[in-house]
Image: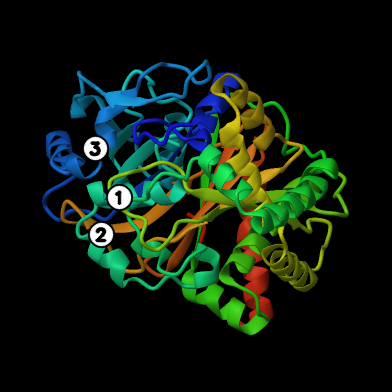
Amino acid sequence: MSTTPDRLTAIDGTFLELEDADTAAHMHIGALLVFAERRRRGTPALDEVRSFVDGRLDALPRYRQRLAGLSAGGLGWQRWVPDEHFDVARHIRAATLPAPGGMNELLAWAGEYYSLRLDRSMPLWEVTVVDGLANGRWALATKTHHCLVDGVGSVDAAHLLLDDVREALAAAPTGDGEERGKPGFARRLVPDSLVHGASAALHAATHPVDLARRATALGELLVRDEIQGAPDTSLNQAIGPRRVIRSVTVNFDDVRHVKRTLGGTVNDVLLAAACAGLRDLLVARGEHLPARGIRAMVPMNIRQPDEHGDALGNHINSLFINLPVAEPDPARRYSRIREVTSTVKESALPLGADTLLRLTGIAPPVLHHLIAKSLFAKRLFNVTITNVPGPQVRMTAFGAPLETVWPLVPLATDHAVGVAIISYDGHLCFGINADLDSVPDVDVLVAGIDRGIADLQQLAGAEHPAVTL
């Protein structure tokens, strides 16, 4: 496989193939950014936003490129080519919320917005300026295809919109470094592409000791996460094209207090909160709770500290964590999650997942779609839960403070729920993306996450409740 910069990697191409295989699967990521009122200035004018972003696109040249073809697969890998008809106006639009412009109206609009796919004939990103929010507030909704950036990259691209984000991220604490994959994770703004699978596999083959380690790790992964398989649940059924968006916001200091008091990591606390919500959802449905738990795919950043520049793409690996939804006691549930995450991190499973991902790059594009489907099959995992670090200082755009960020993780075939979490300005914001047709009871999940955080705070003696928006 060529290392030509304008050619998609195997993992980048995977997200195109998942869309090609299922018209209900939308492989875009994004975020809803809510801003305070611009005093006496109102919502930024559409032309103002377009001009501002257009002036910064030189930092991200791929945002002016489109795919050479409209579908993945075939005999060659997809390529990025210049869009001869690029017009920033086609990518930045405006929308107005119906009265009274509260959070319910904003989330309802977001559900419709994220239900629509990006147009593959153009560069695969867009931004919508949303006005009509109560109290003079306004929002920016971003949508970027996963083949263009990963979750970290989508946050990195915020420097197109936010003032001085490079300096803010460079100075921001990362919280628990072990959750970020590498020290200084929050400082890297624009990632390089993932190392191409074929060259990586050939490199491994020339190092017998490393090859033996990888072979053992791969075997462990396949036995644990494929032969044993994820349990059957109502979270994994055919999905439709429509989405419903919800959010929960919690105080970062409260989460850190839980971590310090009960042990573990920030990520353990967040996984426990998500586990509580998923448990409540399955219980409310009268569903059998699998004793082994349900399996979460937890993406993990694997960039090196010096990986930055103008290249985008995906540079991620995944851990598979069993969430003990059958455990009713919050303290025991948290203890089990701590044990599971610690065991997985210290095992060969991350190396096995990395090896499997690298080996997929050897397959020719015409066959790679089969691998792509298997990597995101419901037998491998039940739900995606991703945690992305953001700046811990207040950011602004167009003279208005950014109040909150609600992130979005896409839903693959037969996966009805996804949870994305981002830290920002002393808060952790959960973004819940669910299939509208198969998860009409999504608010049970939301309330369960809120209660899960509250239970952990009570165990740790914290005073501040979670805030649902």
At horizontal 46% and vertical 24% (from top left) the residue drawn is 77
> In the rendered image, which residue does mark 3 sit on?
61
Sooner in the amino-acid sequence: mark 3 or mark 1: 3
Q: Which mark is residue 165?
A: 2
- Please say if 1 is above or below 256: above
Splitting the image into 4 quarters, where does residue 130 fall?
top left
**Front residue of 465 and 419:** 419
**Badge 1: residue crowd in 10 Å (few <14, some 14–19, many ≥20):** some
Alpha carbons under labels 3 and 1: distance apart: 15 Å
- Determine whether the residue tagged by mark 3 lies in a helix, strand or loop: helix
**Front residue of 451 and 102:** 451
**Front residue of 89 and 109:** 89
Q: Which mark is residue 359?
A: none
Alpha carbons under labels 3 and 2: distance apart: 19 Å
Q: Amino acid at mark 1?
A: Ala
- Determine whether the residue tagged by mark 1 lies in a helix, strand or loop: helix
Residue 360, position as x, y percentages in the image: 61, 36
Q: Which mark is residue 158?
A: 1
Q: Amino acid at mark 2?
A: Val
Residue 12, position as x, y percentages in the image: 48, 35
